[in-house]
Structure formats: structure tokens, C-alpha cells
Image (tube, rainbow, N blue to C red):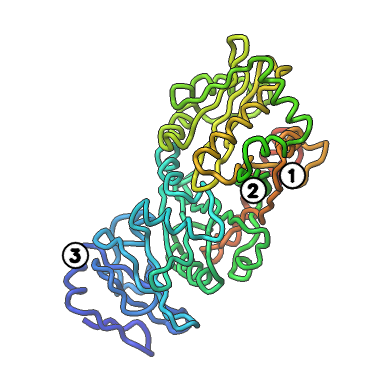
Amino acid sequence: MCVEHSAEAQICLPTAVENSTAGGWIKFVAVKHFSRLCCAATADGVCWKGVYGGLIPRSPRWRTLWPTRRESLQERFHPPANRGGMKGGRTLSGVTLRIGEARGREEWNSALACAPRNDLLQSWQWGEFKLHSGGWRPTRLLVWRGDEPVAGVQLLSRRVLGVQSVYAPRGPWWQDDEALAALVRWLRRSLRFAAPFLRVDPLIEDAAPLTRLGFRLAPRQVQPRATIVVDLTSPPNEILAGFDQQVRYNARLAERKAVDVLQGGIELVDDFYHLLAATAERKGFAERDISYFRQLVSDFGDDAPVFLARYDGKIIYGAIVVMFGATAYYLYGASGGERKVKPSELVQYRSMIWAKERGATHYDMWGIPAHPTPENPLYGVYRFKTGFGGIEQRYCGALDLPLLPAVGRASPGLEATAIKLRSLAAGKGFRIEDHLA
């Protein structure tokens, strides 16, 4: 069967393709817009030209080949019959890049471990946790050069207020600019018409590699743009010696005052959440439901312990630490009750020793204001976290890649206006208030 798409070229589809249209798994590929060519990929994943995508053809004569039911983001990247990698194109180095979905936890996490920088939020476990706790559907894409993974990204997608949202927390990652460019081209073509824009939050300080490829600064931040990372490669006594003098004194004071540090799993979540809810009420911010924290500890198991400080029979401080790779992350903390015995410093020290014993080389304090000033409501958090002798790391922040020609470009401005209107309604003025920015 031959289908004429333009005056310049025809695309000849094999009989197998013609016969498989009833199955509904014929996909289209946008090759290069200036060539005005499209080509099809059957259920076995074969693609004759271009990069696998999912653009809806405009010509009526192609409609019989388009799936009749709504596809998920995973289906957009891979037909159900084929979950392996698909051939991309030959690069300037002369080596063919393959792009496809990771085939399992071991393959994805192994590739992530080879990245120049990796993060908990790009881990396979985090994607599964977000699926269970918030309905975010994870898709993990890898770019191979030969047998070596050279770029990748974990995408989380779900509908928010009726609009599809696609987000890559602390991603993408890449080995070189060529691999990054191939991945972005793939995403731009495959996600077009799937969402207004793709939001990413990479572990880089300079956004130039992504802005050159069409990304631009997002109107608001999702993850902190700065953090404190403590080196755990030294012996425990030297880690303690690296703390500020006052922090060392406070940790030892808590020990002298017989503050008991409990370590456990999901059985301690209720006590932690009771303390966290009281903290949220005291400081006037909304917190997630307890099911979120139960799911987190359940999904990560032994890699997500709950630490509680108990004094005089009462829980006065709590922390949830999650470990991935060689880094432990202090994700959540809560305090209340008797603070004179300084439980937080002791719990943080014990958490670091636990992480070190499990092979961690770094302890991420997870977020400080990028521009700390005494007027910032999080200035106290900044002072606390900088007292543990870590090194400050900064990131470029959230970036957006427009996917729809008009809507994608307008979405960030509309989002910024909505944020300002909410701020105005709360009596805080027509502005974007982001204490972590």
C-alpha cells in the first residue's frame, strides 16, 4: 500500500503494516518538518526512517492508521509488543545512538549510577513511590551509544486540573552534549501534543546546555535550588569535629541529657507525623497526608529509616532519611516539645553515622534558600543546616521545554499569573513568593 503524503515523496507501507491497522498499534514518526515526510512504526517497533514519535497526522487519508483509544505516556514511547530500545540515528561521531525505555530497575539504576551526577528523585524507587502515592506515571528513557548508556531521564506524568503535566525531577542527565541533543530531540518529537510543556530540574548550575536546545526558565521552582552536602568519608569522630562548635556542643549536650534516639521503619511513622502536623500548624504551612509518609517508608524499606528523639518519655524531634546510591538524603524533619536539650543535632549526627555504616559517602541536607537573608522565613533552616560543616551546592532551577507551538509558549506566563493571583488573594501582593529561589 502506498500513501502519498506530499508532491515530493511517497511512503510505501508493507503488507504487514496494512494488515495490522485493525490492531490499532500503528504509530507515526515526524522525520524532519522541512522534508515533509512521515513514516510508520508497526507493533514490532520497526521504524523505517526518523525517530519514533507520535505526532497526529493532519491528512484525512492517514486517520485509519491512528489508534482510536487514548494512549498513556509509556505507550507513546513504546507499543506494548516491544519494550526494547529503538534505533535513533547516526551522530557526528559516526556511532548510532539508540533511544528506548529502560527494561527494569536494575538496568535503570545501573545506568543512573554511571551518570556524572545522579539523584534520589531520578531513581527507579522514587518513580514507583510517586506512582503509588500520587498517581504520577513514571517513564524511564535511556540513550545508548553502542552498549554504553550516555543519557537518560525519568519522566513523571499525570493530569493536573485536566491538563497533562510531564516533569523530570532532578533530570535529565547526560555524558556529553551530543547525547543530550539526541535525547531532547526525541522528547520534543515524542511528547508533542502530549502536554503543553516539559518541566525539568537538572543537577547543573549553568543552564546553557539546555537553553541552547530550547529550554527556558520556569516561572516557579519545584525543587530547592541550593543544598548543603556533608562529606561522610572521614571517621565518625572527624565528621563530628567538622561541625560548627555550637553544633558539636549541642549534640554532646543531648547525649549528656540522656536524649534517646530511636530508629525504625513504618511503625514509627505515626509518631513522626503527629510531630510534623503540630509543626505545620505552628508555622502555618500545609503538609501532606500521613499516607504519603507511610508509602515512602514502605516503598524504600530499610533505605528509609525514621529517626525519633525521645526525652522524658515524649517525642521531641523526628527525621526521615532516604538513601540511594552513595548519598543519604535528609528529606523530612519535625520538632516540638523540649528544645533546650538540643535533640536535632544529635539525631542528625546519628543519621550520618547510620548512612556511613551503610556505605554512603555524602549526606544531603536537602534544601536551603538560594539567597538567604535574615528576612527570609527559612533563614533559621539555613543557619541550622550550614552548621554541619557541609559544602553548598547550587543548581540552575526548573526549566521548561514548550511542546505545543502556541500553548506551550504561553503556559509559563499563564502559570505565573495564576501564582500571583493566589498570592494576591492571600493578601501577600501580586507576586511570586518563593523562599527557596
> In the image, which disc is placed on residue 353?
none
Q: Toward the viewer: 204 or 350? A: 350
Residue type marked 2: Gln
The reply to whether residue 56 is visible in this rendering is: yes
Q: Secondary structure at mark 1?
A: loop
Q: Earlier in the sequence, mark 1 or mark 2?
A: 2
Q: Secondary structure at mark 3?
A: helix
Q: Which residue is mark 1?
A: 431
- 6 in relation to 375, above or below: below
Q: Earlier in the sequence, mark 3 or mark 1?
A: 3
Q: Quadrant of residue 135?
A: top left
In the displayed structure, does residue 264 sit left or right of residue 260? left
Q: CA distance from mark 3 to mark 1?
A: 53 Å
Residue type marked 3: Ala
In the displayed structure, does residue 339 sit left or right of residue 178? right
Q: Which residue is mark 2?
A: 221
Q: Percent x, y for residue 116? A: 55, 61
Q: Residue at x 41, y 32 (%)?
A: 298
* Front disc: 1 or 2: 2
Q: Secondary structure at mark 2?
A: loop
Q: CA distance from mark 1 to mark 2?
A: 14 Å
Q: CA distance from mark 2 to mark 3?
A: 45 Å
Q: Which residue is mark 3?
A: 22
Q: Percent x, y for residue 381? A: 72, 34
Q: Percent x, y for residue 13? A: 24, 79
Q: Quadrant of residue 18?
A: bottom left
Residue that protrudes farthest toward the top in the picture: 312
